[in-house]
Amino acid sequence: MKVLYFAWVRERVGKAEEALDPPEAVATVADLIAWLSQRGDEYAHAFEKPKVIRAAIDRIHVKQDTAIAGAREIAFFPPMTGG
């Protein structure tokens, strides 16, 4: 699957996107965040407050308990403000 990073998540990870194949045990968005945070210091820093991270699967905003099976694209971004 393609994983996209936006705003300060992208800045902390150090890349805008990457192709990943997480282990089968990674079943939800929350699981993916936890797995990503173990991939190195830059990921740990980007996902240090997982509850504030927002996600979209195939361009649809989802909650962190959403299953990722079959997802082609998952995007992570910080909270957004209106304006």
Image (cartoon, rainbow, N blue to C red):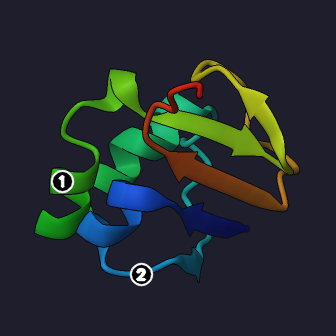
Seen from the viewer's position, the closer of residues 7 and 12 is 7
The picture places residue 16, in percent across and down from the top left corner, at: 51, 77
Residue named by callout 2: 15
Tally of marks: 2
Q: Residue furthest front?
A: 83
The kind of secondary structure element at disc 2 is loop
Q: Residue at coordinates 36% horizontally, 57% vertically from top-left?
A: 9
State which mark lies toward you, 2 or 1: 2
Seen from the viewer's position, the closer of residues 41 and 60 is 60
Quadrant of the drawing holding the N terminus: bottom right
Q: Residue at coordinates 61% horizontally, 65% vertically from top-left?
A: 3
Identify the disc placed on residue 30: none
Q: Quadrant of residue 83?
A: top right
Left or right, 51 with respect to 39, comes to right
Seen from the viewer's position, the closer of residues 19 and 24 is 19
| Above/below status of 12 relative to 69 | below
